[in-house]
């Protein structure tokens, strides 16, 4: 075939070879806002380095390979011995190793650790989201283990280590470990109090044998797991190591790996316990209270992870529109496409600003900030994770047929998008958790309203939305059926208040006009045409060398 019949023109160059952190103004500004001057320079250098790696062709290839070659379960060795190992493609280990080395499991013990880690998590998971699961749970296990100082002294240095060591060996022989979690069972799912896995006390204090199953056990290749089981005193939290101190394998029978919609690079499993050795964490009968801090930390990662997916999808859409011509000009110059891109950019920036504000609250660790987090985390988890799928789907459409093709990377983002809305409690669970906090912890609402009130008077649409929220909260009639409505308004008001305080005027104006003022349609691309949409899009444009 003659070359003249297949001349390639008007195709968009790949978005590669750029600094994912440095090209994200909303995230860069959040880091500067929430970090003290004394550590800002070092943190920015670390994040720029991580961002350059995330935007490199090599790391993007790792992400593609890890998803094209999903994990495989090896239940037995060639001789018939039970081994219950999960085999990963080398690209998975490279991604995970780079993340651990960059400190993405280390937040609790270093200055402003949560902001630094959240920013890094948002950057790095744009390259590949599946390996974020073990990163998140390893990070989140720390507060649960701190309920037992003796356990924390042994495990916390390994959990927060910047050394990644694959392979199953006794924890004492490793310089760093990963943790997973097993809470849900077939008969109950989110209703963990209906768990049937039993825990039998042994003679040694704090030691038990577990018998039962876990319907969803995340990251089964990990070195240890926090699980819930029924002890004589009620539902209790336990630490289950994969390898016992003497080097023998604990009983941890992996039945199968889940065949999931997305998150293909990550292993999610069903496991059976049959005389499995475990160490109690916290008191008997207080398992939910013990593990709840782990759940809260992973819920924040759901927010940050969804913000990462949105940011990458929006960056791809704007990059495509910057280079693709149609109907006599670049797509980005067309008023209707500009409206769509600006609308998507608003959603992405609002998610980023909110996620980073929550991380800063963890770092502050004051009574006021803890009360704020009690409501803000489930509200943010509910709303941001739900917006993720809509944003990614619309961004994919901006690429047209090219976006529907696997090579674009957009289908992988779209398959990943619903995960965070389901993981660690789906929408109804979050909404009911908000109601529980409103009823039992009045200080939480006071703290949220004080946070929102910092922007009161700056925008009349925000003021009106705050008033409407207070009206909703004052009426408790049919409150459970209205829970989603209340939580949605709570999240939008919080996002609006943060943008009014910290975002450029054109971003705050567009957000308040559409999300709070009602001047918006039912799909993206329906912003008022009188707004400064070009500036909103330009702010979100990923700059490349």
Image: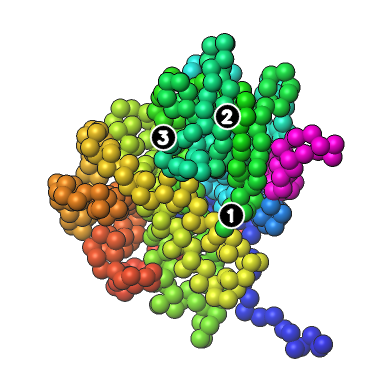
Task: Return the residue nearer the eye: 403 or 265.
Answer: 265
Q: Which residue is mark 1?
A: 260
Residue found at x 48% / y 56%: 418
Q: Is residue 471 left or right of residue 147?
A: left
Q: Secondary structure at mark 2?
A: strand
Locate residue 1, reporting x and y percent: 82, 87
Dot 1: within a 10 Å radius of its alpha carbon, few (fewer than 14), some, or many (20 or more) residues?
A: some
Locate residue 17, reporting x and y percent: 65, 57
Circle on res. 193 = 3
Q: Secondary structure at mark 3?
A: helix
Residue found at x 41% / y 56%: 386
Residue found at x 31% / y 74%: 529
Q: Secondary structure at mark 1?
A: loop
Q: Which residue is mark 2?
A: 211
Q: Are marks 2 and 3 in contact (CB under 8 Å)?
A: no
Dot 2: within a 10 Å radius of its alpha carbon, few (fewer than 14), some, or many (20 or more) residues?
A: some
- Extent of the magenta region: 71-100
Instruction: Give above or below for 131 relative to 67.
Output: above
């Amino acid at each position: 075939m003659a070359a003249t019949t297949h001349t390639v023109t008007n195709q968009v160059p790949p978005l590669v070879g750029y600094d994912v952190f440095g090209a994200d103004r909303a995230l860069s500004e959040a880091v500067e806002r929430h970090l003290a001057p004394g550590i800002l320079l070092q943190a920015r250098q670390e994040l720029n380095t991580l961002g350059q790696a995330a935007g490199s062709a090599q790391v993007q290839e790792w992400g593609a390979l890890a998803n094209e070659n999903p994990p495989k379960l090896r239940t037995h060795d060639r001789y018939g011995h039970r081994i219950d190992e999960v085999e990963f493609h080398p690209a998975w280990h490279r991604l995970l190793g780079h993340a651990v080395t960059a400190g993405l499991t280390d937040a609790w013990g270093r200055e402003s650790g949560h902001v630094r880690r959240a920013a890094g998590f948002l950057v790095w998971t744009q390259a590949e989201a599946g390996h974020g699961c073990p990163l998140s749970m390893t990070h989140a296990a720390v507060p649960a283990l701190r309920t037992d100082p003796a356990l924390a002294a042994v495990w916390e240095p390994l959990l927060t280590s910047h050394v990644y060591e694959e392979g199953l060996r006794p924890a004492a022989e490793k310089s760093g470990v990963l943790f997973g979690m097993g809470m849900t069972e077939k008969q109950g799912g989110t209703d963990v109090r209906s768990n049937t896995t039993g825990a039998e006390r042994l003679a040694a204090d704090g030691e038990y044998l577990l018998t039962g199953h876990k319907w969803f056990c995340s990251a089964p290749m990990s070195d240890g797991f926090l699980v819930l089981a029924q002890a004589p005193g009620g539902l209790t939290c336990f630490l289950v190591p994969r390898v016992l101190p003497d080097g023998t394998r604990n009983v941890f029978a992996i039945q199968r790996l889940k065949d999931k919609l997305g998150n293909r690079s990550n292993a999610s499993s069903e496991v059976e316990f049959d005389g499995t050795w475990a160490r109690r964490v916290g008191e008997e009968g207080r398992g939910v209270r013990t593990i709840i801090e782990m759940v809260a930390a992973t819920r924040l990662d759901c927010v940050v992870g969804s913000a990462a997916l949105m940011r990458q999808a929006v960056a791809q859409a704007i990059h495509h529109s910057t280079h693709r011509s149609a109907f006599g000009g670049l797509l980005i110059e067309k008023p209707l496409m500009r409206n769509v891109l600006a609308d998507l950019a608003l959603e992405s920036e609002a998610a980023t600003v909110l996620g980073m504000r929550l991380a800063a609250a963890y770092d502050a660790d004051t009574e006021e900030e803890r009360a704020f987090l009690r409501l803000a985390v489930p509200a943010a988890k509910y709303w941001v994770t739900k917006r993720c799928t809509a944003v990614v789907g619309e961004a994919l459409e901006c690429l047209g047929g090219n976006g529907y093709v696997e090579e674009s990377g957009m289908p992988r983002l779209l398959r990943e998008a619903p995960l965070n809305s389901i993981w660690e409690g789906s929408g109804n669970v979050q909404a009911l958790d908000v109601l529980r906090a409103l009823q039992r912890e009045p200080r939480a609402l006071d703290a949220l309203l004080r946070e929102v009130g910092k922007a009161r008077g700056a925008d009349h649409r925000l003021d009106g939305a705050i008033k409407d929220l207070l009206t909703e909260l004052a009426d408790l009639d049919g409150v459970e059926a209205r829970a989603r409505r209340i939580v949605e308004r709570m999240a939008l008001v919080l996002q609006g208040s943060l943008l009014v305080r910290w975002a450029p005027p054109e971003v705050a104006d567009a957000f308040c006009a559409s999300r709070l003022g009602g001047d918006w349609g039912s799909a993206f691309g329906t912003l008022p045409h009188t707004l400064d949409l070009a500036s909103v899009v330009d702010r979100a444009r990923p700059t490349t060398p």
